[in-house]
Amino acid sequence: MLKRTLFFSNPYYLSLKNNQLVIQSKDELSTKTVPVEDIGFVVLDHPQIGFSMKLLEILNANNVAVVFCDSKHMPSSMLLNLDSHSLQNELFRAQLSATEPLRKNLWKQTIEAKINNQATMLEKSGHKAFELRSYAKSVKSGDVENREGLAARIYWNRLLGNDFYRDRYGAAPNHLLNYGYILLRSAVARALSGSGLLPTLGIHHHNRYNAFCLADDIMEPYRPYVDRLALLVYSEFPDETMLNKEMKAAMLNLMSIDVVINDNKRPLMVALSQTTASLGRCFSGESRKIVYPVFN
């Protein structure tokens, strides 16, 4: 069943009753409830939102991704379950003992999938992508020739023009891309945790200050889904340089968009769990292939 995404941008008090999330307005004029088992993603984006610890405990126990936004209304932290899989100890050990050749092979698969998805994104947008198809076929173990970077330059220039510069603080639609990538990263971290994996220990990313290296690795092939949605939202709000409530709500649809994975159409949040479960099988030696979606 597709889990629901909830976005709170007004002052509410959130609590738990009969395994239901109780949403009460601060003026106590309205109360709504949502079954906790139906929730997959919660975004809290208002300084006057209050909640009970029991609610957080149950959301955590159900592996719900709870994302907290900062004073600039950008996702800044999240609640992460540290005990979400019965074989977590075994999977952590397998992940920690993964050999360098295995990690490089997994990164090769990841970049191949990312470049192919970027190529399809370009083609769907009316652009040629033969160079990217060629790059995807020539990715070597560990992507030692940085096909990812070569493909990225062509991808962004062709998709948004030579003047576009992909940057955290860059011009629109960077604000939408940034927001979407942060949401995607949170969802990947949730899926990794749910599959018994440690989001910190990456197969390629290894920055000592980054607590989500593995999430940053695994989200790469999923980025074109953010790009497509961000461009769609941007086309509806071309003059907005700051994110408004409607734009954020539209970007949250990312979690429920259909993607094709293993020849089946699944909501993105479900596909992420399939990807992270396949990664767990790679670490435990049951498989050597990560299952990624094919952009369509």
Image (spheres, grey):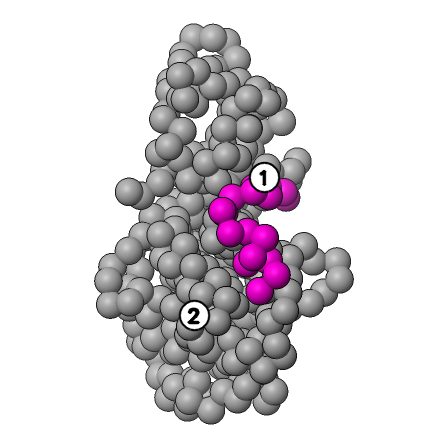
Observer-nearest of 246 and 74: 74
Q: Is residue 162 magenta?
A: no
SS label for mark 1: strand
User: Residue at point 52% right, 68% down?
Assistant: 283
Numbered circle sitting on residue 286: 2
Instruction: State which mark lies toward you, 1 or 2.
Output: 2
Observer-nearest of 174 and 277: 277
Which callout, 1 or 2, points at the residue further toward the start of the chain? 1
Asked if residue 160 is positioned above or below residue 154 in the image, the reply reads: above
User: Residue at point 60% right, 71% down?
Assistant: 98
Q: Amino acid at mark 1?
A: Leu
Asked if residue 139 is positioned above or below residue 21 in the image, the reply reads: below
Question: Which residue is tagged 1?
Answer: 79
SS label for mark 2: loop
Total numbered circles: 2
Residue 63 appears in the rendering: yes
Circles 1 and 2: CB atoms closer than 8 Å: no
Q: In the rendered image, which quarter contains the C terminus?
A: bottom left
Q: Residue 251: x and y, percent? A: 43, 48
Observer-nearest of 209 and 158: 209
Q: Amino acid at mark 2?
A: Glu
- Can you name the residue that lies furthest to the left here? 264
Residue range of the region highlighted in magenta in the rendering: 76-94
Observer-nearest of 237 and 99: 99
Residue 33 falls in image quadrant: top left
Residue density around tag 1, few if under 14, some if 14–19, many if 20 or more, within 10 Å: some
Q: In the rendered image, which quarter contains the N terminus?
A: top left
